[in-house]
């Protein structure tokens, strides 16, 4: 993922770096301290075939339909401009509840974790006033076992029929926390946990657009935590108190500034692949939202491709001699994806060399191969973090999962 600190590219690329840093990387830390990095993952599709999810057994595993890629009724555009599809949690009976746990832990001293929850205002049957809710949950544990005083925190968006929007409240599982806040008329809100160093802030806010940070959060609760202590985090989401046919939608789970709890070797490889993704991304002006059309040159694209090739080769080299990857990763798949990315980046670079020799200046002929190289590099990054692609041949079918290290 392009980062705001990257200095490897010519000036025309700076604008995109800044924009993408605002879009998907609000925080970047370094963990583990021996040179590993942090990641930001935006998961559009919480499909259990892509994202490792444990659906907890509450005694009735069939009371809630867990359906990914369900069309969200209000007409809003998703990040890729196509129809807005989300995880749908629909009750099959009264009193329905479900809790889904992300089966990947994340480590960070500072992190932002949020998700969108929504309901269809035209179909509120089964949403019980003051009872039906969707939630986002965070479990924290410092390495070594101490919990820093805040082992469990939960944000709940409770359906409020009178206001036509949710009442968002915080809890520690047994007692309320902070100040519950009503969002009248808001059919979609973001629930957010933000670690700001010495404090954990629980926030919520109505959305004002389709992109991940199109919202203005309002503080619900804040409390002190141990500053600078690397917390192990587990994330969960779900619904509770639904009447039959009651439905909530969940999407855009964002895990910002946190490293998946995988091995040092995997983290090092992912960090190098991130630099390669950064480079390949910048070699494709068509992929980069046409921001460079006036000033980018084929020389700029070729420089980026040279860097991409070097970084992918370095990542594959680091994998040589590795006896095996941790079971929680998809390391072998990641290496195959990185190999495909390398071939594409090399072909794009060779094409650029030929065009330069002919005196050509436009970088656009390289865009298709550079885009594909960046996508396969992106796929390798999320695979090594333990996420799977839902398609063997199309890296963009990875659940719209944006990544960076």
Image (tube, rainbow, N blue to C red):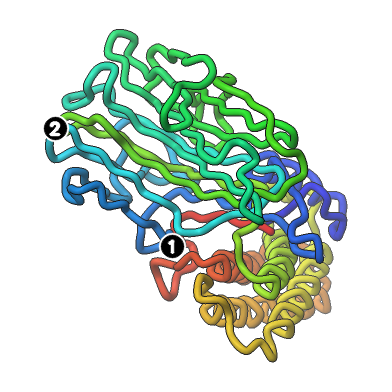
Q: Circle 1: is it few (<14), some (14-19), or many (20+) Cα within 10 Å? A: some
Q: Quadrant of residue 83?
A: top left
Q: Is residue 209 left or right of residue 344?
A: left
- Which residue is at a point 70% across and 50% down the rendered structure image? 230
- Which residue is at a point 42% across and 75% down the rendered structure image? 392
- Which residue is at a point 29% across and 17% down the rendered structure image? 130
Q: Which mark is residue 94?
A: 2
Q: Earlier in the sequence, mark 2 or mark 1?
A: 2
Q: Nearer the viewer, residue 402 or 116?
A: 116
Horizontal and vertical percent position of residue 178:
54, 18
Residue at disc 1, secondary structure: helix
Is label 2 or label 1 in front? 2
Q: Is residue 286 visible?
A: no
Q: Is residue 57 left or right of residue 178?
A: left
Residue at disc 2, secondary structure: loop
- Residue 89 against residue 280 in the figure, above or below: above
Q: Quadrant of residue 397?
A: bottom left
Q: Nearer the viewer, residue 295 or 213?
A: 213
Tell me how far mark 2 sits from mark 1, CA to CA.
35 Å
Q: Nearer the viewer, residue 43 or 12?
A: 43
- Residue 356 against residue 375 in the figure, above or below: below
Q: Quadrant of the N terminus?
A: bottom right
Q: Is residue 198 visible?
A: yes
Horizontal and vertical percent position of residue 256:
63, 46
Circles 2 and 1: CB distance less than 8 Å? no
Horizontal and vertical percent position of residue 367:
64, 64
What is the total number of numbered labels drawn onto the structure image? 2
Q: Is residue 395 left or right of residue 316?
A: left
Q: Quadrant of the C terminus?
A: bottom right
């Amino acid at each position: 993922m392009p980062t705001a600190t990257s200095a490897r590219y010519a000036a025309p690329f700076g604008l995109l770096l800044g924009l993408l840093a605002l879009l998907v990387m609000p925080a970047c830390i370094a963990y583990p301290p021996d040179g590993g990095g942090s990641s930001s993952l935006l998961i559009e599709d919480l499909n259990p075939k892509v994202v490792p999810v444990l659906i907890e057994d509450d005694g009735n595993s069939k009371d809630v339909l867990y359906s990914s890629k369900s069309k969200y009724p209000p007409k809003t555009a998703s990040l890729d401009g196509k129809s807005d599809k989300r995880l749908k949690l629909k009750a099959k009976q009264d009193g329905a509840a479900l809790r889904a746990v992300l089966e990947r832990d994340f480590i960070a001293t500072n992190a932002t974790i949020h998700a969108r929850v929504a309901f269809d205002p035209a179909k509120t049957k089964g949403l019980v006033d003051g009872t039906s809710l969707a939630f986002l949950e965070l479990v924290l544990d410092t390495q070594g076992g101490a919990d820093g005083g805040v082992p469990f925190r939960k944000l709940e968006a409770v359906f409020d029929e009178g206001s036509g929007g949710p009442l968002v409240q915080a809890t520690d599982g047994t007692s309320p926390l902070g100040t519950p806040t009503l969002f009248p008329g808001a059919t979609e809100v973001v629930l957010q946990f933000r670690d700001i160093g010495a404090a954990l802030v629980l926030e919520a806010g109505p959305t004002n657009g389709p992109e991940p940070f199109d919202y203005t959060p309002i503080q619900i609760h804040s409390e002190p935590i141990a500053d600078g202590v690397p917390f192990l985090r587990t994330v969960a989401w779900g619904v509770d108190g639904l009447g039959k046919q009651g439905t909530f939608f969940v999407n855009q789970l964002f895990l910002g500034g946190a490293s998946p709890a995988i091995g040092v070797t995997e983290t090092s490889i992912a960090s190098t692949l991130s630099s390669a993704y950064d480079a390949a991304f910048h070699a494709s002006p068509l992929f980069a939202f046409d921001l460079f059309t006036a000033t980018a040159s084929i020389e700029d694209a070729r420089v980026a491709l040279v860097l991409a090739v070097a970084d992918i080769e370095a990542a594959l080299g680091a994998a040589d001699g590795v006896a095996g990857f941790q079971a929680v990763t998809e390391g072998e798949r990641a290496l195959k994806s990185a190999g495909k990315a390398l071939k594409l980046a090399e072909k794009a670079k060779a094409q650029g060399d030929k065009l330069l020799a002919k005196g050509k200046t436009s970088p656009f002929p390289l865009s298709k191969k550079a885009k594909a190289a960046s996508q396969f590099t992106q796929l390798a990054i999320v695979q090594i973090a333990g996420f799977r692609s839902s398609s063997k041949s199309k890296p963009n079918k990875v659940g719209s999962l944006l990544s960076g290290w």
